[in-house]
Amino acid sequence: MKACGLVVEYNPFHNGHVYHLQQAKKVTNADCIVAVMSGSFLQRGEPAISDKFHRAKAALQTGVDLVLELPFVCAVQHSDLFADGAVRILHECKISALCFGSESGELSSFVHGYHAWKENKTKFDIFLKEKLHLGYSFPQAAKYAYEKLGLTAGDFDLTQPNNILGFGYVRAIMENNFPMEPKTIRRIQSHYHDSHLHGNIASATSIRKELLGNSELTTKARNSLPDSTIVQLDAYRKKADLWHHWELYFPLLQYRINTMTPEELRQIFGVDEGMEYRIKKMASKAMNFADLVRLVKSKRYTWTRIQRMFVYILANIKDEEMNRLKQAEIPYLRILGFTERGKAFLNEKKKDIAVPLVTSYHRDQHPMLAIEEKASHAYYSVLKAENKQTLFQQEMQGPVQI
Amino acid sequence: MKACGLVVEYNPFHNGHVYHLQQAKKVTNADCIVAVMSGSFLQRGEPAISDKFHRAKAALQTGVDLVLELPFVCAVQHSDLFADGAVRILHECKISALCFGSESGELSSFVHGYHAWKENKTKFDIFLKEKLHLGYSFPQAAKYAYEKLGLTAGDFDLTQPNNILGFGYVRAIMENNFPMEPKTIRRIQSHYHDSHLHGNIASATSIRKELLGNSELTTKARNSLPDSTIVQLDAYRKKADLWHHWELYFPLLQYRINTMTPEELRQIFGVDEGMEYRIKKMASKAMNFADLVRLVKSKRYTWTRIQRMFVYILANIKDEEMNRLKQAEIPYLRILGFTERGKAFLNEKKKDIAVPLVTSYHRDQHPMLAIEEKASHAYYSVLKAENKQTLFQQEMQGPVQI
């Protein structure tokens, strides 16, 4: 069987994603679709609107055959590490093609970009460091470096989030010589940051806005979602009694920061030296989460980076725990769900898969999975006691089967 | 000026306390009353029903002249350490008498008890250890040891909480030869654990029950409280929108335990080796705080001891922080409030007081005060963001003045 891999967050799984997977299947001529999906927390340092299992189920009911978890330590990272982790997971799972959405739909510009970057790596790093030293944020410094290498011309604008990720996938495949064909399809939806719903395809951002503003799924939101997502979102809402978003976590985060010493705070992954005092000072002043990010923000740190830092504080993930993980190692594949076809694919490939297939948390688990467990606990912490218990149970019960 | 010291929790300050301080003034012939009071958390490992400042104010308006904070590290401790810390604070503050309530009202039995304990210290310790090794709790083992020394006969029953504390005060004074006259008066109220309100004097336990069962102060509760407490409780309730009790803290505690590694949990003060696994296991099962204590409890640990352990987990106080404190050192006196008379007393004595008088938290503060600050933050963590900020401000504004 030939599988095409997708790197996704499905927050939530919407019509644009359905289009993407249908096109992916077409252009790669794949028998099945394997999605590697962020779990409880997302690349931009936010809690997913609903849990990983209901999100996976919605996708499995509408075309995806196998959903693997992108580990927390890869998912809640800047785009380079996010892309690298996702590609490695797909490689471990023996998929033969990877298809991503881009603004242009032209793979050649990504391949050209990779070669240009590769040939000018030393220069790129010099340009990058130059701006970082001046206090620019990483994306700003990277943009400057790409511009200097002439990599932002025309269609291939590396300041567009989807192009940045696409470049990351292509680079990870080519740098590692993975036997995986990269493909890209042109995104037909509105721009990523668009926050207006229009037509049947809308951005995830605009759909979330619609969901968070209303306790029920509005017609506007429903129009942009496949039936399976509507069913799964409704089901989750019934069990959890809420949609997850940062503001709900603010009391926990504030409590946590207020009861930590600056030294303890500095031990958290992503808290740079000196930040601990600023965070502690602002945590007792802030009235809500947005307020806290605004108070802590400076030129050097993007909003997203600060959000990721707060995810690590919330889930209590330390530098020391992250350093214990071997760079670039994928120690297991965690299966969140599969269809019959996904199961057949796994059965065919399992003799070639070098790492254990994992379905739930267990004693003496890999440190990467222990981090996942803490993050999951943090994720469900905003629920009422009874809902918390029921929903955390899913994490122990293993994959969703369709 | 001659001051009489009282060791109190005032949770809340009620008619029994008014009687106690009036009698104390009479029997010691004192000009003023100095109370050393537990702050945010209490000896039995519980949050105080309202904050320290409103509790102090109620007392200052009805006869107490100066309220000092019993530091968290002394207050949330078994009775021996609680009593020892309180007596040391009063000694530092140059009071000349200490008056405590007891079942018998006979000081001689406490003095006799002290001498008997002193002469038989080695035997006492052997009896104590014998039972501790068999898995008895500390209070049970101590009861056994006192019985073997014949110290539970008649009026002097050392299994009564107030007698245990009184014995602790007398022992601390006599062991250290403090120039402080111990006095005791007979308690006229119902037994400490009584949970029925009757007449104008009722136990604090029964009053709390009445408060927690109703959002307003009931007539039943009002009958047992001086006007100043009614005013201060009402004022606090208006600002905080709640009474503090353990169940409100359960989501924070559960979140905290669920996102800690067993190794981190073992570093918390009061978490004995081996307990960390039991606590982690039970924290994800428990539906509420009472449930969690019940699940963690065993013969060796009293309910109270487990509650104290959870206070230390909640406030994130580590062994290492506690070990940094010098045994028996009182590094400062924190003034929570005073009347004109209390101020005059302080002015007269301040040249003799060897430690700094502290009123709020500050940079580079003593580690004992840093612990207090964390505990205070934990205490206010259950409030809404705006209330939390307003009420924490009190901690920075310094003492209440009447």
Image: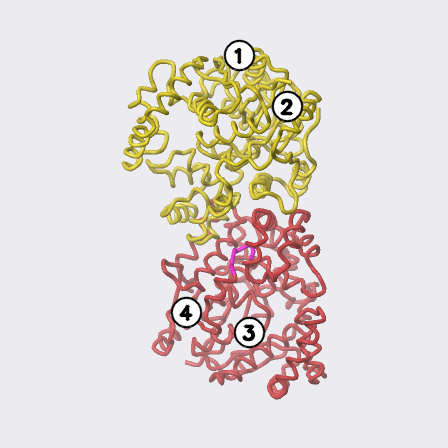
Chain colours: A red, B yellow
Q: Position of residue B289 (x, y in %)?
A: 46, 39
Report which residue position mark 2 lands on: B58
Residue type at mark 2 is Ala
Classify mark 1: helix, strand or loop.
Answer: loop
Picture quarter with the C terminus of chain B: top right
Report which residue position mark 1 lands on: B199
Query: Relative to B65, is B390 above or below?
Result: below
First in sequence: mark 4 vs mark 3: 3
Report which residue position mark 4 lands on: A332
Which chain contains the residue that carries disc 4? A
Classify mark 3: helix, strand or loop.
Answer: helix
Crowding at mark 4 (Cα within 10 Å: few <14, some 14-19, many 20+): many
Look at 44% across and 60% down and name the residue there. A370
Picture quarter with the N terminus of chain B: top right
Which label belongs to residue A83? Answer: 3
Whether residue B326 is visible here, answered yes or no, is yes
Mark toward the viewer: 2 or 4: 2
Distance Cα–Cα, label 3 vs label 2 = 61 Å
Crowding at mark 3 (Cα within 10 Å: few <14, some 14-19, many 20+): many
Q: Position of residue B47 (x, y in %)?
A: 53, 34
